[in-house]
Image (cartoon, helix red, strand yellow):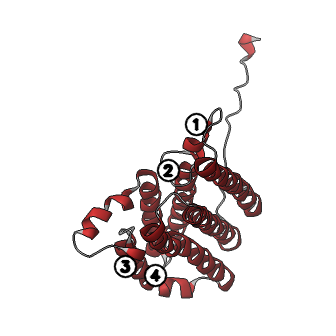
Amino acid sequence: MVGERRVVATLLSVAAFLLLAGFLSLVAKLYLTDFFGRDLFIGLFDLNNESNMPANFSALILLLSAVTLGVIAWSRRQNASADAFSWRALTFIFGFLALDEAAMLHERTADITRSVVKADGILHYAWVLPYGILALIVGLAFVRFLIQLPGGIRSRVIVAGAVYVMGALGFELLEGLVVSTEGTQNLLNQSLIVVEEGMEMLGVILFIGALLSYIRLYLPGLQLHLRVAAPAAPDAADR
């Protein structure tokens, strides 16, 4: 298995590049009216757009988390471990998060939420309310699971989760407040978007690192290999 440090370092490097490009795209959007390839560059790297490089990367690392969780869930189930169900549940949760990131499903809940409650100010992005409630329910449901994790892994998972939730929900609330008073096209709101997306990426990457460490330390019999079939030796008659 490729060392988790190398995987984490590679993912962090890609995330740093995308965040830098995203920051430059917001500078171009706010302050540079025209230059060759401006619209293409903004379209590719704008952190507040969908179906571009940062959005696809975020969906990809969430999917990678789901696959890694699925591998752990399969291994724990083979060993008839009591926590196999929890690992499997996390697999589905992160699979949903990957789908949500790719299809922007959370944005589609905004109108439904606004029809029930007055969404303004920090709730300008109304999807944070149902998703915040779901995050709280999931967090409480997995308290026992977290307690049973090995100490080092538990700490890393908690830190990763806190970073992700603070970015996805906490900074979205701040953005809602800014947008309600200042609008969207200003440096403060755009900078908050960069920080939000950066924290989400960082949280997921830290989580992947924790999962890979768990496999290495506590599932030593589990090895993932990419096999390449060797070419068949020619028959004597063909020589």
Say if mark 2 contacts mark 3, CB within 8 Å.
no
- Specify the amino acid type for callout 4: Gly
- Specify the amino acid type for callout 1: Leu
Mark 4 residue crowding within 10 angstroms, few (<14) / some (14–19) / many (20+): some
Tell me residue 44's x, y (percent): 58, 42
Among the two numbered marks 4 and 3 on one chain, the one whose residue lies closer to the N terminus: 3
Identify the element where label 1 is drawn: helix
Which quadrant: the N terminus?
bottom right
Tell me residue 58's x, y (percent): 55, 56
Mark 1 residue crowding within 10 angstroms, few (<14) / some (14–19) / many (20+): few
Instruction: Please name which of the two marks, 4 or 3, marks the residue nearer to the observer.
Output: 3
Among the two numbered marks 1 and 2 on one chain, the one whose residue lies closer to the N terminus: 1
- Residue 81 vertical placement versus 233 (above, below): below
Task: State how far apart marks 1 and 3 are (Cα).
Answer: 37 Å
Q: Which mark is residue 133?
A: 3
Among the two numbered marks 1 and 3 on one chain, the one whose residue lies closer to the N terminus: 1
- Specify the amino acid type for callout 2: Asn
Task: State how far apart marks 4 and 3 are (Cα).
Answer: 10 Å
Say if mark 4 contacts mark 2, CB within 8 Å.
no
**Residue that extends furthest to the top in the rendered view of this protein:** 238
- State the residue in front, 111 or 73: 111
In the rendered structure, the answer to whether residue 27 lies left or right of residue 76 reads right
In the rendered structure, the answer to whether residue 14 lies left or right of residue 134 reads right
- Kindly indicate the quadrant of the structure image that contains residue 4: bottom right
Task: State how far apart marks 4 and 2 are (Cα).
Answer: 28 Å
Q: Which mark is residue 139?
A: 4
Q: Which mark is residue 40?
A: 1
Task: State how far apart marks 1 and 2 are (Cα).
Answer: 12 Å
Say if mark 4 contacts mark 3, CB within 8 Å.
no
Q: Which residue is mark 2?
A: 49
- State the residue in front, 67 or 184: 184
